[in-house]
Amino acid sequence: MLRFLAAVVVMLFFASTNLSAQADTTTKCCCKMKKGKMMCMKDGKETAMKNDTTMKDGTKCMVNGECIMKDGKKMKMKEGDCMNTNGKMGKCDHKPKKDKKSSAAYVCPMHPEVTSDKAAKCSKCGMDLEKKK
């Protein structure tokens, strides 16, 4: 009997550690479906979801696009759907922040990696930066 109880305790221990290893994360970002992939938007940065995520209200969003609402109702996210941190579903209306380089209006003709958002001189060769075409 004692061996049986010890075996049960060991099994429960391993089962609980396995579950905690697979546990999802509580998020401070919204989740959206983009081009068939679940994305996480936080601080203006958009990244692919790697783990299932739980919203503040208990709604769970999974990497495969399925969501389990706090009332237990299941749904599948469609292109453009967005789940905010409070578990509210809608169309995503916020866009990722633009990268500084992509908003640069001026570039060096000799060194395209040197850019600026205003007219300036190239830090490598001293040439005037030209307006992007």
Image (tube, grey):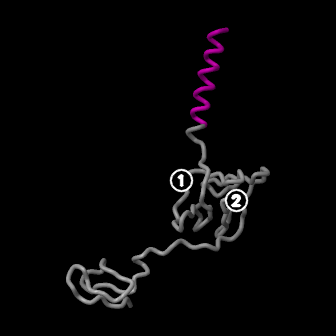
Residue in the foreground of this view, choosing between 82 and 97: 97
User: Where does residue 124 sit, x and y in percent of width and height?
Assistant: 22, 79
- Secondary structure character of the magenta stretch overall: helix
| Amino acid type shown at disc 2 | Asn
Relative placement, left or right, of 133 versus 10 is left
Q: Which residue is mark 2?
A: 86
User: Residue 117, relative to residue 56: is it above or below?
Assistant: below
Residue numbers of the magenta segment: 1-19
Name the side, left or right, on which 98 lies relative to 79. left
SS assignment at label 1? loop
Instruction: Report crowding for label 1: few under 14, some 14 to 19, many 20 or more residues within 10 A (C-alpha).
Output: few
Q: Residue at x 55, y 63 (%)?
A: 42
Q: Which residue is mark 1?
A: 50
Quadrant location of residue 120? bottom left
Indicate whether 10 appears above or below 53: above
Q: Disc 2 to disc 1, how far (Cα)?
A: 20 Å
Q: Residue at x 67, y 8 (%)?
A: 1
Q: Nearer the viewer, residue 33 or 69?
A: 69
Task: Give x and y (percent) for residue 70.
Answer: 75, 51
Picture residue at 68% right of the left edge, 55% below the top: 66
Q: Is residue 34 left or right of residue 110?
A: right
In primary-sequence order, the first of circles 2 and 1 is 1
**Is residue 40 inside the magenta stretch?**
no
* Left or right, 99 with reference to 126: right
